[in-house]
Amino acid sequence: MPLPSRLILEDGTVYDGESFGSAENAIGEVVFNTSLTGYQEIATDPSYRFQIVVMTYPHIGNYGIEAAVEQSEGPQVAGFVVRDAVAVPSNARSEMSLEEYFVRSRIPGIFGLDTRALTRKIRSEGAMRGMITTQDRTVDDLLAEVRSAPSMSGLDLVKHVTALRPWIAENVESPQKRIAVYDFGVKRDILRHLAGAGCEVVVYPATTHASEILDSRFDGVLLSNGPGDPEPVTYAQDNIRQLIGRVPIFGICLGHQLLGLALGGRTYKLKFGHRGGNHPVKDLRTGRVEVTAQNHGFSVDPDSLNLSDVEFTHINLNDQTLEGFRHRREPVMAVQYHPESAPGPHDSFHLFGEFMQMIEEWSG
């Protein structure tokens, strides 16, 4: 039988439910994701480090777990909150249940609570720290532990998810281009798309000096997604500044934010972030609207960028936040959303083609 479990928010709100997965405590920023599918991709996305994810779709776990869709080496979330945790998956490719997966990976989950009410609270009051626990301790005792946890603002989480040493991600016969990927928490699907474009892909730790990249004479550099606040990741910003104008650069998600900072801009924390597979983004160059996958809690302040250097290319149609830009003179492009996910189902794949075209133009 499932153990009784509680989700405790830093404002003292308590949600009662039942435990699935590990019975350990989980502390992190409580956020919500509006995707109907993709719970395994979400759980294994390094951008969710130190976050407890609330899934707004009620039935989670119904198609089980499949190793082929993992975005990293196992789950990265701090915890998982669902309305109904499906115990018996129905999928011929399923290798285990979500319950078994989280037990094996020591990820705590809670189910049986009102996720709609919880999501409305986060939307109205903002993301906040919380704890999933099965421990029979007083709320005041648990609340003190939650409030002592670090807040997401000012937190460098890249150092917890980046590669320890360079490695070749994809072996491609007769590669047309060589791409260096700065690993701030890169998703595997990004690497697969680069390989699909005929690229040899070499992944580098986030602290790699720009000179090492330049000395290896790559055709392009991709700045990956990743967790946490971009502002304290100053080592990445410094290296990006040294790369601008010397090699084509494509930034995705955290890479977009770090590029904005490297160009002299500012970032700010969103109230509850953008997380889901249904966010409409308009391409300002064509008027075309893409249905995008997103996962970020910070955004680049468009008023902080120099418009003589930067052209805005994409905007979020829900809240008008900046979703993409290009440099007017240098081979630099960036988007805030995830083109490799493309829930449209392929609305954003063209951005990898734009990156390849930018490389061709630069080399020419």
Image: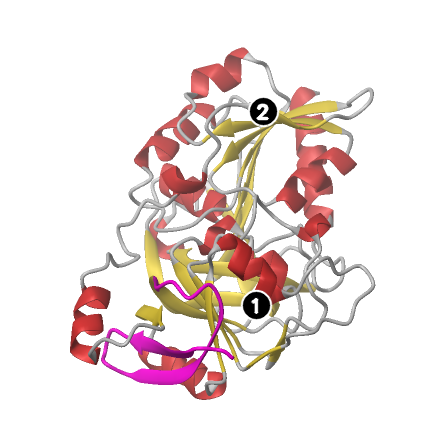
Q: Residues within 10 Å of mark 2 (few under 14, many from 20)?
A: few
Q: Residue furthest top?
A: 215
Is residue 146 found left or right of 259 in the rendered image? left
- Front residue of 161 and 201: 161
Q: Is residue 18 magenta?
A: yes
At label 2, which amino acid type do we have? Answer: Trp
Give neighbour class at mark 1: few <14, some 14-19, many 20+ (Cα, 10 Å).
Answer: many
Residue 282 seen from this side: no
Q: Which residue is mark 2?
A: 167
The relative height of residue 145 versus residue 34 in the rendered view (above or below) is above
Closer to us: 192 or 71: 71
Q: Nearer the viewer, residue 133 or 364?
A: 133
Quadrant (top left, top right, bottom left, bottom right) of the C terminus: top right
Which element carries disc 1, helix, strand or loop?
Answer: strand
In the depicted structure, whether residue 142 falls above or below residue 200: below
Q: Residue at x 47, y 28 (%)?
A: 244
209 w.r.t. 308: above or below: above
Amino acid found under the numbered disc labelled 1: Gly
Image coordinates of residue 134 in percent, x first then y, are 36, 73
Q: Is residue 89 left or right of residue 84?
A: right
Residue 121 percent location from the top left of the image: 37, 83
Residue, x 55% and y 71% (percent of image)?
317
Residue at horizontal 33 percent and vertical 31 percent from the top: 235
Q: x and y percent of residue 195 in the render?
A: 74, 34
Task: Report which quarter residue 292 is drawn in.
Answer: bottom right
What residue is pinned by disc 1? 276
Q: How many marks?
A: 2
The magenta-colored residue range is: 1-26
Residue 68: horizontal and vertical position, in percent? 72, 49
- In percent of the image, x 50 and y 25: which residue is there? 245
